[in-house]
Image (cartoon, rainbow, N blue to C red):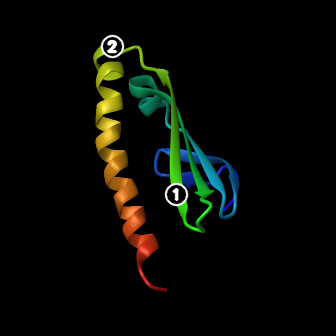
């Protein structure tokens, strides 16, 4: 991975192997509709040796009021599916 690498509508802003990755939108059309979006995925180790994946999303609000109101709900549905897929992949035997 390298800073600036493209991930569909995002680009890699920052990362540390096995710890975190931060992506920001790099598509002007997406940003004009949804607003500027930054997402961080953080792996956090627990005391029992297991780990959990946390996601933080920051959105500079869209000027479209309806989109701004619906975006968190739509994102929640997509994020839940994405995290369940990641969980399933992580639990597969190597």
Q: Where residue 84 sits: x, y (%)?
A: 35, 59
Q: Quadrant of residue 83?
A: bottom left
Figure check: 94 above or below 52: below
Above or below for 71 versus 9: above
Measured Cα–Cα span from mark 2 to mark 1: 34 Å
Q: Residue at x 34, y 29 (%)?
A: 71
Q: Residues within 10 Å of mark 1 (few under 14, many from 20)?
A: few
Residue marked by disc 2: 65
Name the quadrant of the N terminus: bottom right
Total numbered badges shown on the rendered structure = 2
Image location of residue 21, percent across then percent down: 62, 52
Q: Nearer the viewer, mark 2 or mark 1?
A: 1
Work out whether 30 lies above or below 46: above
Report the disc number at residue 52. 1
Disc number placed over residue 38 in the picture, else none? none
Image-based side of 6 in relation to 74, left or right: right
Is the residue 54 above or below the residue 56 in the image?
Answer: below
Q: Residue at x 29, y 36 (%)?
A: 74
SS type, badge 1: strand
Q: Residue at x 36, y 63 (%)?
A: 85
Count neighbours of disc 2 (C-alpha within 10 A) and say few if under 14, some if 14 to 19, many if 20 or more: few
Q: Residue furthest front?
A: 48
Circle 2 — which element?
A: helix
Q: Position of residue 37 (x, y in %)?
A: 51, 33
């Amino acid at each position: 991975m390298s800073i600036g690498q493209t991930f569909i509508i995002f680009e890699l802003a920052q990362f540390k192997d096995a710890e975190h990755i931060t992506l920001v939108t790099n598509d002007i059309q997406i940003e004009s509709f949804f607003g500027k979006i930054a997402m961080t995925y953080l792996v956090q180790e627990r005391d029992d040796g297991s780990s959990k994946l946390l996601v933080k999303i920051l959105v500079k609000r869209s000027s479209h009021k309806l989109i701004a109101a619906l975006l968190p709900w739509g994102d929640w549905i997509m994020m839940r599916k994405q995290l369940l897929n990641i969980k399933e992949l992580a639990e597969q035997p190597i």
